[in-house]
Amino acid sequence: MGTDAPLPAPRMRFECPERWASLRGDGCSRFCDRCQLEVVDLSALDDDVVRDLHQRPAAERPACVRFLQAPDGTLITRTTRRKQLLDVLRGYVKR
């Protein structure tokens, strides 16, 4: 069940110096050889999946994440980008 409420971006205690492009893998998950952990790109996931990850016990959540943050402090997800694209397309259709 989805909701239209924007998701707040996570507050991070540590910013990893590794570049996403240098990590092994593709899609929404890659592996960091430096720390030996999976890194999940929250911005490549739908809102419902991010909410599900957040509601899991801490031991079951990804230890490392990557994400894009909007100027208002909310998390940019695949759902957010899809809505933005639809808004742009609707604007062109109305012309």
Image: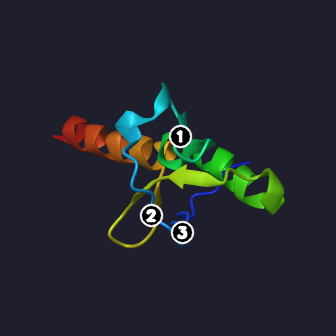
Q: Residues within 10 Å of mark 3 (few under 14, many from 20)?
A: few
Mark 1 and mark 3: Cα distance apart in space: 25 Å
Among the 4 quarters of the image, the one containing residue 37: top right
Q: Give the number of the mark in front: 1 or 3.
A: 1
Identify the element where label 3 is drawn. Answer: loop
Tell me, yes or no, if residue 29 can be seen here: no
In this view of the protein, which residue sits in the foreground, 81 or 56? 56
Q: Position of residue 34 (x, y in %)?
A: 52, 44
Q: Quadrant of the C terminus?
A: top left
In what element is the residue under mark 1? strand
Q: Which residue is mark 3?
A: 8
Position in image of residue 94 (x %, y %):
22, 41
In the rendered view, how is the structure colored? rainbow
In the image, is 91 to the left or to the right of 6? left
Residue occupying image coordinates x 36% and y 35%: 21
Residue type at mark 3: give it. Pro
- Please give left or right for residue 69 compared with residue 24 in the image: left
The reply to whether residue 72 is in sight is: yes
Vertical placement of 59 versus 88: above or below?
Answer: below
Residue that label 2 marks: 15
Residue 11, position in %: x, y? 54, 72
Residue 89 sits in which quadrant? top left
Q: Earlier in the sequence, mark 1 or mark 3?
A: 3
- Cα distance between the residues tagged 2 and 1: 14 Å
Question: Reading the chain from its start, which is encountered first: label 2 or label 1?
Answer: 2
Mark in the foreground, 3 or 2: 2
Q: Is residue 25 above or below residue 47?
A: above
Within-10-Å neighbours for mark 2: few <14, some 14–19, many 20+: few
Instruction: Residue at 54%, 48% (x, y): give it.
Output: 42
Name which residue type carries label 1: Cys
Q: Which mark is residue 32?
A: 1
